[in-house]
Amino acid sequence: MATKVTAPGKKSLQTTLEIGKAIRAYYGGIKEAQKAGKPVIWSYGLVPREIFHAADAPVIYLEHLPLMIGAKQLSGHYIQIAEEEGFSRDVCAFHRCFLGCAVAKERDPYLEKFFAPPNLIIASNLPCMSESKSFLYAADHHDCPYYFLDAPINTWGKDIPEYAIEYFAGQLKGAIDSMEEHGFKVDMDKLKESINLTKKMMGLWNEIDNCRKTVPTPMSTVDGITAAYPLIQLPGTELGVTLFERLLEELKERVEKKQGVIEDEKLRLMWFGVPPFYNMGLFNYVEKYGAVVVKSMVEYIAGGAFDPSVMDPEKPLESLAYKALVDIVNPTYTNMVDFIVKAVEDFKIDGLIGVVKRSCGLLPGYMRLAKDAVYNGSGVPMTIFDLDGLDIREYDDVTSKANLDSFVESLLANKRRQ
Amino acid sequence: MGTLETMKDIFNNPNKIIEEWKKDGKKVVGHRCMYVPEEIIHAAGMLPYPTFGTPEPIKKADSYFQPCACEFVRNLFDLALDKKFGFLDSMVLCNTCDAVRHLYNMWDTYVDSVPCYMVNNPQKMYDESGFKFYRMELEKFKKLMEDLSGNKITDESLKKSIELYDETRRLLKELNDLRKRDIPAISGSEFLRTSMASMLMPKENANPLLRKLIDEVKNREIKNADGPRILLTGSIIDNPTLIELVEDMGGVVVVDDLCTSAKYFWYTTKPNNDPMDAIVRFNLERTLCACAHPSEDRYDYLQGLIREFNIDGIIYFNIKYCHPFVYESAIFRKKLEEEVPTLTLEVDHSLSGLGQLKTRVQAFIEML
Ligand code: SF4
Ligand code: SF4
Ligand code: SF4
């Protein structure tokens, strides 16, 4: 019998467990909502969901189903289904997995609890080609309307010109019109209110981050990735604010007590690329060396590296447009690279781990850029190796751990020499 | 030498074009891909130069790009690192696929000798607000080209450039129409060389050559024309080897929906008093690039090709990790197959693994 090598990550905070529950509760409710006659939207994590909250719309996010079923080690099965439909292994594993879920003739009981067919799909090219194209197949399969939200890439850094904001805000307005055409009522006052709540959430997230910069860190990325969920799903909601308030409180307490994730923190690491969702325990693996993965880049997707003060509730669509366009994952590279360099310094990172998910068109392209920029900026090294965080069939536990072993050992040896 | 041979010679030795052009100190601007308006570069008195790859294996670029980036783009970057594009005064990219976006990131960071610029185009077609956004981007681009060349671009010069480029498109289309016949006048591989040579050449030289060529071949019939009529589509093909492979297996390649062929010349600019608006609409009132939306538009265009060219079979040559076409072929194939058999093949830009491809193409053609 094969020995199971994967393990869930060990979370150490109470609030992240609550966030986990909130995710499951949210998805459990979608099916019920559809049964009660509410249309369901399928969309992506980077489509500003404040517009969905303003319509009280139940939304399934492409990223979440694969993550949830990935954590249950079911992603391989659905990925296989998509491949049988003609999607090559070059297609992003998230999208293959989601498409497998979308077209499967039968779904396992776990997925069945969350799965609701779409009444409207809102897709975008932010940040990659996959996000804009894969849903076309699902729209065709479920014979449902499809709105394409076109996001310009960011060639301007933080100074997004008016005409780009205007264009993307217009695209958001188009998405709202399309929602209204398909049975939703978008409440513009609620949208304004949700901008206020988003500002508050982002402010709290920045404070949470400040706590995490302390040595020893009170929270590792195992909790961090779950904690980042409200950034994707709950901006603009009271629940998101409450969860972050609680998390901040918990962290402050830990900082005060100097309580770290592990007892003797020797090394601080950062993860760049898609985390191993079916084996989050891999993050805990390095703890035997006294190393903690303090941060991971995915925690910053959907506004995590964002200055909320620029948002204006009186201009909700423009504010959301700005937030989306400056997101670190929106190409081109300046914001991403600047952010990584700064995060490595702020979080006092000793080593950067870059993992390449070969079917991703976006993140692998940043590896060399991040490696050089970080090394030139602060002398911090980066290791890069293949690891598909979603397709468990591609996972090689021995090699992944060997890669981590040799990197961490070399970092420790360097430290000893200093 | 017949004009077909001349075209082949130009295709094989593009450096001659550059040498000739640069003799008077004029500048060359490289680009990739279709949302970089060549007319603006030309109106500034410079030569727009579509960058193509070579079938050489990748050397230096692989320590920058991960191997999961499209090989065409890695190849272009390899050439850039190797200073093979050293003759360019600037490189211009646009917002298409993930790979091209990363080419910009890499070029901007690691290639000092040739500055790189990104034109930010919408990916949604037929959208007035997108026209406005693109226009703003193109105004900036126009200014950049004026500064680079030292020449002012006037409405008049731009209109002239549009007319010149449209003439090239019209002539290529006229030549391409000769492939509609039961026995085409020009083979697929001959056409690709001609089309690429015309793309590379100053259009002032390309147009008379194309006119001459049409005249020379209009009564010609190619040999071996009794096989199934093939429509080629998929990722960029910048080398006739794959087309020759299909032809060697008995297929008659009668039209190619490629960025080096039909996509370049299929449409011409609509009359418009405002030349910048004409360019905006030329690029955004059509969906030819697989990155753009709505994709139904591309599907209708493919269907048009199937009918017009009386197609028996379609072959998608998808470069490995070319996401736009990997998605498109998976999405279109089912529907296309209701009309004509469709084969999807994964290929390496460096043309390795041709033996295996041969077997699959042969089986497909025999099946037709
Ligand atoms: S960024 Fe990468 S992992 Fe995320 S959806 Fe796009 S291709 Fe997939
Ligand atoms: S399809 Fe053509 S225009 Fe579009 S990205 Fe590819 S090479 Fe460029
Ligand atoms: S469209 Fe495909 S072949 Fe062309 S550059 Fe992009 S990934 Fe490469």
Image (spheres, grey):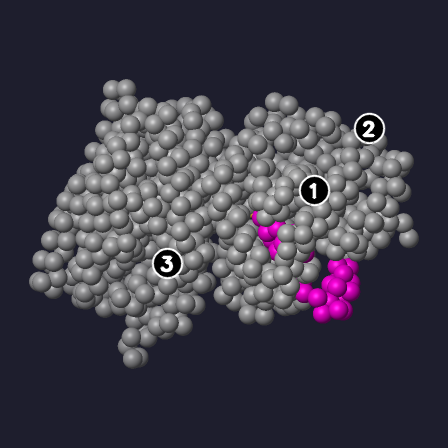
Residue ID for mark 2? B182
Q: Nearer the viewer, mark 2 or mark 1?
A: 1
Q: Please name the amino acid that badge 1 sits on.
A: Phe
Based on the picture, tell me whether residue B14 belongs to the magenta stretch.
yes
Based on the picture, tell me whether residue A248 belongs to the magenta stretch.
no
Q: Please name the amino acid that badge 2 sits on.
A: Asp
Viewer-nearest residue: A165 or B295: A165
Image quarter hosting the N terminus of chain A: top left
Image quarter hosting the C terminus of chain A: bottom left
The reply to whether the residue tagged 2 has its Cβ within 8 angstroms of ligand 2 is no
Give the image location of residue B37, x and y in percent.
61, 51
Give the image location of residue A410, x and y in percent.
35, 70
Name which of mark 2 and mark 1 comes first in the sequence: 2
Category of crowding for the residue at label 1, using alpha-carbon neighbours closer than 10 angstroms: few (below 14), some (14–19), many (at least 20): many
Looking at the rendered structure, the secondary structure element under dot 1 is: helix
Give the image location of residue B63, x and y in percent.
52, 63
The reply to whether label 1 and label 3 mark residues of one chain is no
Q: Please name the amino acid that badge 3 sits on.
A: Lys
Please report, as a chain letter, where disc 1 is located: B
Q: Nearer the viewer, mark 3 or mark 2?
A: 3
Residue B265: assigned label: 1
Q: Which residues are magenta?
A: B13-42
On screen, residue A142 versus residue B188, left or right, reads: left
Looking at the rendered structure, the secondary structure element under dot 3 is: loop
Residue A158: assigned label: 3
Residue B310: assigned label: none
Residue drawn at (30%, 56%) of the image: A305
Give the image location of residue B46, x and y in percent.
68, 61
Viewer-nearest residue: A312 or B158: B158
> Spatial distance from mark 3 to mark 2, Cα to Cα?
58 Å
